[in-house]
Amino acid sequence: KIINPAPERDIGASVENMNLVAEEEGIGCCWIGAFKAKEINNIISVPANLSAELILAMGYPLEKPIPEDIEKGASIKYYKDESGTLHVPKRKLEDILHFNQFEE
């Protein structure tokens, strides 16, 4: 008998793959990990021996957000400009990627 010691890794990989395919099809996704599991389990009739671990909300987006590189330490708060376009600040890859060790 093989027991999976870390099923959350399988869940994460599965959801990320679903997210990538949805994106390719023009469907937006939002991975939701903070929710009232007991209420969701009741709403969707999850059997007692199982439990919802996360929610992947999917739908066709009404907006086309603009991702923007930001400087290290800057706000990552989303905002809309005067024309109503959503701007999504993103940290630069070099600010979050580490090679062999973390740096201060």
Image: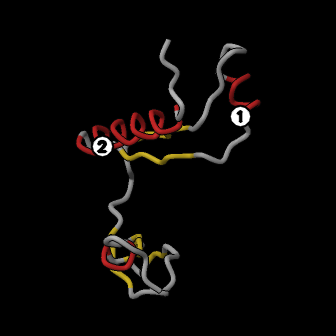
Question: Where residue 38 appears, x then y in whole percent?
Answer: 76, 30
Q: What mark, if any, has residue 20 been given in the picture?
A: 2
To which quarter of the image does residue 20 belong?
Answer: top left
- Which residue sits at x=36%, y=36%? 18
Question: Where residue 52 appears, x then y in whole percent?
Answer: 62, 29
Provide the residue designation for mark 1.
37
- Which residue sits at x=38%, y=83%? 70
Disc 2 + disc 1, Cβ < 8 Å: no
Q: Is residue 21 above or below residue 46?
A: below
- Which residue sits at x=37%, y=79%? 95
Tell me how far mark 2 sits from mark 1, CA to CA.
Answer: 25 Å
The residue closer to the viewer here, 70 or 3, is: 3
Of labels 2 and 1, earlier in sequence is 2
Name the kind of residue labelled 2 in the image.
Answer: Leu
Q: Is residue 89 above or below residue 7?
A: below
- Which residue sits at x=50%, y=40%? 57
For label 2, the SS is: helix
Name the kind of residue labelled 1 in the image.
Answer: Ala
Other-residue count near label 1 (Cα within 10 Å), few / some / many at <14 / 14–19 / ≥20: some
Q: What mark, if any, has residue 73 been given in the picture?
A: none
